[in-house]
Each structure stands twice: as structure tokens, then as C-alpha cells.
Amino acid sequence: MHDPTRTGNEFFVCDFCRRHWATDRPMVEGHQGSLICGPCLTTAYATVVNPAQGDAGARCTMCLEARPDNHWASPAHPDARICARCIRQAAGTLSKDTESGWWRPA
Ligand SMILES: [Zn+2]
Ligand SMILES: [Zn+2]
């Protein structure tokens, strides 16, 4: 999400942990300014994509679709959820970006 009351790095806020952008916290943008940061993506990837689990059928914060895929919902902000497709997509984006310092969890 974007915080219109802030500028610079603090304008960009992860929907899942509500922390702002930083050089050690790369972010991937979804629809309507939704954002997920590297640490949240790591948790999401490890929780949902590796073992198939999570809540099915809820609306994804990133693609705004209610897909039958598994989701990861943020423990701190359970209204923020990301579907397995967006997790894979964001993981692809961040792991291609060598400056992000992000790696897929084993
Ligand atoms: Zn985050
Ligand atoms: Zn999605």
C-alpha cells in the first residue's frame, strides 16, 4: 500500500507487515498499489508454496482475485492475503533482481 502522508521510502508500505520500504527490504507491487516485502514473501513462500496449505477461496490483496489457490494471510493483518500464484510471481521477480538480496526459502 502507499502512505500518502509520507514521502520517499516511507511512502511504500508492505500490506502484510505495514513496514516501509528499505534497502534491505525489497518489495513487489501488485494491483492498486498493493505491496509485499521480501521478509513477508519468505514467510508466505515457506508457508504456502512449499507445503500445500492455507485458506482457499479468499480474495488476494495482490491480484484482487478470489482464486481457488491456497493463500497466505498475514498473522498481524489477516485481511492482507496473497495467493499462491502471486507468491510464485513475486518470488520470480525478487529472485531475478540481484540487488534485492532475496532468495527463495529452501
Ligand atoms: Zn512485509
Ligand atoms: Zn493473487
Image: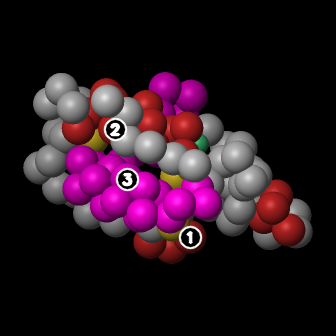
Type of amino acid at the residue the image marks with label 2: Tyr
Q: Position of residue 67 (x, y in %)?
A: 17, 55
Kindly indicate whether the residue at mark 2 contacts the one at mark 3 (C-beta within 8 angstroms): yes
3D distance between C-alphas at marks 3 and 1: 18 Å
Q: Which residue is mark 2?
A: 45
The boundaries of the magenta stretch are 74-100
Q: Are marks 3 and 1 in contact (CB under 8 Å)?
A: no
81 vs 26: above or below = above
For residue 71, which quarter of the picture?
top left
Q: Residues within 10 Å of mark 2 (few under 14, many from 20)?
A: many
| Mark 1 C-beta closer than 8 Å to ligand 1 | no
The reply, left or right, for residue 50 in relation to residue 82 is: left
Which residue position is annotated with label 3? 91
- Label 1 secondary element: helix
**Residue 15 is one of the magenta-drawn residues:** no
Which residue is tagged 1?
A: 33
Q: Nearer the viewer, mark 1 or mark 2?
A: 2
The furthest residue to the bottom:
32
Q: Is residue 84 left or right of residue 13?
A: left
Instruction: Looking at the image, tell me whether mark 1 or mark 2 is earlier in sequence order.
Output: 1
| Residue 103 in picture, x, y percent from top left | 44, 43
